[in-house]
Amino acid sequence: MDTLAGSALPPYNLMPDPKPLHGRRIVLTRPREAAIEWRLKLESLGATVIELPLIRVSKDVNPNTLAEVFEGLGGYEWIIFTSVNGVKFFFDEFHRVFDDIRAFGLMRVAVVGEATAAAIREKHLRVEVQPKKANAEELAKALIDREGMDSAKVLVITGNRNRDTLVKKLEEARAIVDCLPVYKTEEANLSADPVAGDFRAKGADAILFASPSAAQSFFDQADSLKLGARAKRPLAGSIGPSTTAAMKQLGVPVDFEAEVPDLESITAALIKALAR
């Protein structure tokens, strides 16, 4: 008995709470198809998840540009993906046109972000360059530091709202850069959405932003999302520096930010912020 007593578990109130978000209302602003993993994670921690998809993402490819790029695909030394959406829609078109992965050629792959890297690895391709900080500036620096990029032919897979910082920095390093837009991001109109009505009436404990586009849409739809007098004002969380910068520029308060731009990190930051 003494032995058992000496190895007893700590009192219950010292044990980690398995449901640290129990009773909390958390708003997700990602497109529904991209929010599934986030919703399941938050619900597993006890949260009630409110889905307000402020943006929608869809394939948008110019067939002439696509044909030109695919015709010269073997001539590129690097292909760069900055988002999971870019990976998805590029390979949708690639597999529609080519029936052999060897048509991908000898291009090396560079990416921004672990989620994008994971999407590439699912294609059984190796990621050659992935900066520790998930942003375009760091990716350009990593490529330039690696091999200079002078006269390197690069294909950048983009969307309609991608910033041109990466392209500018590579061109300043004398790289030859082509861009292939494969998707578009648009604001979703939530004015008649019953979930938006619930948010206006009750508010939430926190709202999570995963992109500058979502922050812009939230700002643009302020009238449709204005909280009632008795609604709870949520803390606002950001996935990373570019989203934080956009939120601050728009006047949206930033109460917490993920240390690294992924689900685990923003969840940890959320729990910490709500515990204050």
Image (cartoon, rainbow, N blue to C red):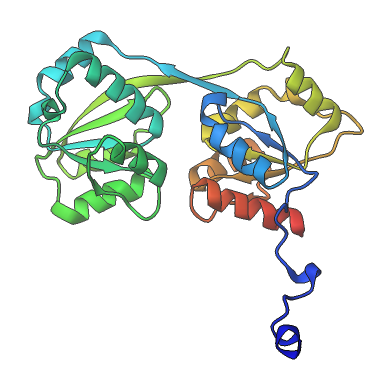
Left or right: residue 106 compared with residue 65: left
- Point 29% across, 41% down: residue: 121
* Nearest the eye: 14 or 155: 14
Name of the residue lying farthest toward the right: 230
Residue 145 position, x and y percent, is 20, 56
Left or right: residue 263 compared with residue 218: left
Q: Is residue 17 above or below residue 56?
A: below
Residue 244 position, x and y percent, is 56, 45
Residue 169 position, x and y percent, is 27, 42
Q: Is residue 123 visible?
A: yes
- Point 12% across, 32% down: residue: 76
Q: Is residue 209 visible?
A: no
Q: Image quarter for residue 44?
A: top right
* Nearest the eye: 241 or 131: 131
Question: On the rendered image, what quadrant is the N terminus found in?
Answer: bottom right
Residue 73 position, x and y percent, is 12, 25
- Point 77% across, 47% down: residue: 22
* Nearest the eye: 45 or 227: 45
Count of residue discs: 0
- Point 57% across, 30% down: residue: 30
Question: On the rendered image, what quadrant is the C terminus found in?
Answer: bottom right
